[in-house]
Image (cartoon, grey):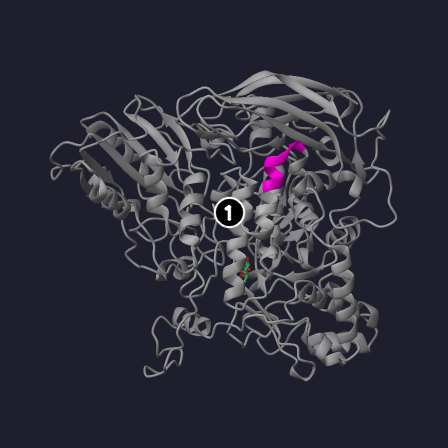
Amino acid sequence: MHWTGAAAVISALLQASCASRDVFSDPGINVDKWHSATRKANALITQLNITEKAGLLTGNLLNLTCGGIINAIPRVDFPGLCLQDGPAGIRTADLASVFTAGISIGATWDPELIYERGRALGEEFRGKGAHVILGPATGPLGRIPLGGRNWEGFSVDPYLAGIATSATVRGIQDSGVQACTKHYVGNEQETQRTLGLAKGVSVDAISSNIDDRTLHELYIWPFADAVRAGTLSIMCSYNRLNSTYACEDDHTLNGILKEELGFKGYVMSDWFATHSGAKAANAGLDMNMPGPVDQYNFTNSYFGPNLVRAVQSGNVSAERLDDMVRRVLTPYFYLGQDKDYPTIDPSGLFVTLAALSYSPSAFSIPDDTPLPPARDVRADHAALIRNHGAAGTVLLKNTKHTLPLKAPRTIAVFGNDAADLSRGSAVPLGAAYAPPQGVPMGVQVMGGGAGSGRLSYVVSPLEALRARAASSNHSMSIQYVTDNSVVANADFSGIYPFPDVCLVFLKTYAAETIDRTSFEADWNSTAVVNSVASYCPSRKTVVVTHSAGINTMPWADNPNVTAILAAHYPGQEAGNSIVDILFGDVNPSGHLPYTIARNETDYNTEVFNVTDPAQVTDAAAWQSDFTEGLLIDYRHFDANAITPLYEFGFGLSYTIFELTGKVNVRPVHGQRTISVFPPKVKENSPGGNPNLWKTLFAVTVKVRNTGDVAGSAVPQLYLSQPRSTVPAGTPMKVLRGFDKVYLKAGEERNVSFPLMRRDMSFWDVGASDWRLPRGEYIVRVGFSSRDIRMEGTIRV
Ligand code: BGC
């Protein structure tokens, strides 16, 4: 690993002691630096006229040099702002990396790696001259297993998602780039995510109808971590919330985000998610992206001149206008983006034009245009990405000592996901518009839409396996059939000699604008697996899935399927990442950031759809009631005693871990009695009442590697609040601590989980505050949500 600067500090802190984990609960904003940046912003504001102020708050879609642009104001030396997608790499760039997707890095359960990824991402955005990265994404949280964008975020569990969001924001901003945490909030499905036309009638976006407690404890939770970490920007989402558009919702923008959570940066709209001027501005929206009203009305904007008029007529106060501008400018000065910031890489424009036009000349790039060479920002990130991809791979099954592969002489590889991409770099850009299964041939290393990046290369599983065979010191032959219909038809006629092991590569596509339609992996995957499993002469079939997240696996119990790896979306080094795991160069240590059910009907939440012809033109028909409240994913499986196939938190290793001794609970609050509500403070700091972020108890266990190879364990702490003093709907247990611990064979270490006040409280709707219920808490520690090895209690 390469650690420099803050990364090294965080790494050292994390390894030092139990309280080290508090680094993710420490405020990410330096108050003195913030004040000094505010002074610079104020000084600039005094020089601006009202039109220039509105210009700082309104995107310019006609400038295609970046995904979003705030115009320069040369008169005052302001160079403008360049905003680029997205969470896993620069969407439109050449010679930039495609990193592991959010779901992959979430599956590592490793805050250090997550920070490292954020930092490397930030370096690339900075290198290309982008001031703002439109990420991380932590909404959708993943309420709906088939949600089209779940893979962009980290986990369906808010605690894991919160820490991952925090580590990412810190990493990005330590590299000098502003994070824009998105999509706030309740954007849990893509279907009707925004308003649209049905038979010529304008129909409103889906309304996510969420009660206050659920909003706080699930959907806003990771955003609170983002604010605590210092995210400089937040993107409001397309959907409506309890019938109000998220980008004009005073309650969640002004009320929760800015007042309760003390967010000092700016709220930017998702693209065309603004539906009003003065109303949105007064509700807390600060920046309107990409500028115009919608795709059909490029000349008008809800902001721009319209905002000027709103201020002149008194519908928006001059103070609020200045507040909006201050919120936008302070982050720019805070990160020192006014000094020696790289210029925008001019090649980005041409990559975008080429992608939009499908041919160089169609979008008026004459054939003889001298194209500016791209700035190569990839540095040594390939090695990180390879490592992250492996670390985010979850070993779900491993029988008959199948993995790691010892010294196979013949490997047979099956499935369209093993191959090179037949459409190369074009895939991710076009992917948003690809059919539900994506492109027919080639490894799925990420999903489509804004969250995709442009591959400057990709290592397929076949390529990596061949390279492995070439460098092996014994002869190893790699045979393959990548055409799924041939495999499904059980045509194995070309395979000889018979394989020592069969590898099946499956893929599942997901993209912005569409929700998934199938739980099983795509391209006739079940027939493909069953066919190989009954053919494979060695009776050892390994299934690898490259997937957006949740898949059902009807073949999982087939005794001939002897190993299963969920490799998620690992990014450009996909083949190398999986080969490192298959051959044991890397010991698998990923754990599921969601639950894999036995049957798709075991899940309790699905995409809301209006299909009744009588209703499709009803402007208000799209009402999705989040009636399950807090009981999503494992909380629902627990509440209803449903046995999953592979539970939340599950992941095998090539070694064995045990907890030894007993659970040790130590109060660290230093008080006789702990108050039920967090002591009030004059003003909330970023993340809300700072007392919520104070550690009350430290729970310690010992973890030992009792196997014979080194590996990383992920001990997890699940907390149950006192049953008698919590309201109905409280989950049986929730994740409230985890760690990633590297242990040599035979090694033992102490692991400590700090429990903060927020971790132990519930959102009391009546009091509008976090209440610490009195009574006995049960602390459960183990290696997954169903593999609990020890219990302890805490009395409050
Ligand atoms: C997506 C955002 C993205 C924006 C800019 C929208 O369609 O929802 O996530 O950042 O486009 O590309």
Q: Amino acid at mark 1?
A: Gly
For this rendering, which residue is in front, 47 or 760? 47
Residue under numbered circle 1: 102
Whole-percent x, y for residue 617 in the image: 57, 57
Question: Splitting the image into four quadrants, where does ligand 1 fall?
Answer: bottom right
The response on whether ligand 1 sits within 8 Å of label 1 is no
**Main secondary-structure element of the magenta-colored stretch:** helix
Q: Is residue 203 left or right of residue 361?
A: right
Whole-percent x, y for residue 616 in the image: 55, 54
Crowdedness of circle 1 by 10 Å Cα count: few (<14), some, many (20+)? many
For this rendering, which residue is in front, 522 or 504? 504
> Which quadrant of the rendered structure holds the C terminus?
top right
Q: Residue at the spot x=45%, y=63% of the render?
A: 377
Q: Does the magenta run of residues contain 13? A: yes
Q: Is residue 337 above or below residue 545?
A: below
Q: Is residue 122 visible?
A: yes
Quadrant position of residue 543: top left
Q: Residue at the spot x=28%, y=51% of the render?
A: 441
Q: Is residue 706 left or right of residue 528?
A: right
Q: Residue at the spot x=56%, y=73% of the render?
A: 61
For this rendering, which residue is in front, 327 or 119? 119
Q: Is residue 83 left or right of residue 39?
A: left
Whole-percent x, y for residue 714 in the image: 52, 30
Q: Is residue 710 left or right of residue 773?
A: left
Quadrant position of residue 757: top right
Quadrant position of residue 52: bottom right
Q: Give the magenta range.
A: 12-18
Q: Residue at the spot x=55%, y=42% of the render?
A: 112
Whole-percent x, y for residue 724 in the image: 76, 20
Q: Does the magenta run of residues contain 89? A: no
